[in-house]
Amino acid sequence: MSKDSMVMYESYYESWKMLNEIDKKYGEEFMEALFKLGLYGEVIEVSPVVRPSLAIASKLVIKATDRYAAAVENGKKGGRPHKVDYAEMHQLMKEGWTDKELAEHFNCTVDYMRKKRKERDDYVMKQKNQKNLTVTVTDTYTDTATGTDTVTDTDFLPSAEKGQGIVTLPSAEVSRRDEFTF
């Protein structure tokens, strides 16, 4: 198996340092053998001086390579397969299935299903909020005959930009000041 990375442990460095003190060629030989084993799965012949250090390091390299292969086999590097088919889960949620029913169907915990439902709901709300903004408007009317009335209502603006503003609409009998945030 060929990879573009490998796990390095401090013990590799210590072995390289020790072999380098004996002779630099032994340190280089150790590192070359270690990288070929870790990256390409190749075992090369090394001198008797390097062999004990490489034997210890190669056990760790092989274990790490086996873990990597198992993770790739599971479908996701470093992870495990998903417990649920998300498309099916979303369809069942639309049909009104409870978290308990979903957990039993997918053979997982109710807490896991609650977490997935919350993630779905948060995502859906985020999508809606990006398309449509809800604006709360406080209208203050000053009518010369009756005094001041304040009315708060919620308006739905299909295509507004995020920000803050104040709109003042004067008229002959009524002055109107709309303050809104979204």
Image (tube, rainbow, N blue to C red):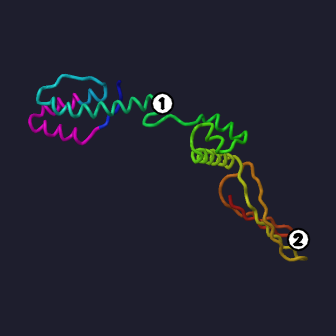
Image location (x, y in percent) of residue 129: 68, 50
Q: Is residue 10 left or right of residue 173?
A: left
What amino acid is found at the position of numbered circle 2 in the picture? Glu
Q: Residue at x 14, y 30 (%)?
A: 50
How packed mark 1 is, by other alpha carbons closer than 10 Å (few <14, some 14-19, many 20 or more), is few
Instruction: Classify 162 as above or below 143.
Output: above
What amino acid is found at the position of numbered circle 1 in the picture? Gly
Q: Residue at x 31, y 28 (%)?
A: 39
Image location (x, y in percent) of residue 116: 60, 44
Nearest the camera: 21 or 79? 79
Q: Nearer the viewer, mark 1 or mark 2?
A: 1
Q: Earlier in the sequence, mark 1 or mark 2?
A: 1
| Label drawn at residue 163 | none
Instruction: Classify 35 as above or below 126.
Output: above
Image location (x, y in percent) of residue 153: 79, 62
Q: Residue at x 21, y 32 (%)?
A: 31
Q: Which residue is mark 2?
A: 173
Tell me the chief SS of the magenta region: helix
- Please report the bounds of the magenta region as a residue range: 8-33
Does the magenta run of residues contain 37?
no
How packed mark 2 is, by other alpha carbons closer than 10 Å (few <14, some 14-19, many 20 or more), is few
Q: Indicate the quadrant containing the C terminus: top left, top right, bottom left or bottom right.
A: bottom right
Does the magenta run of residues contain 23?
yes
Nearest the camera: 23 or 50? 50
Figure quadrant of residue 136: bottom right
Q: Which residue is mark 1?
A: 75
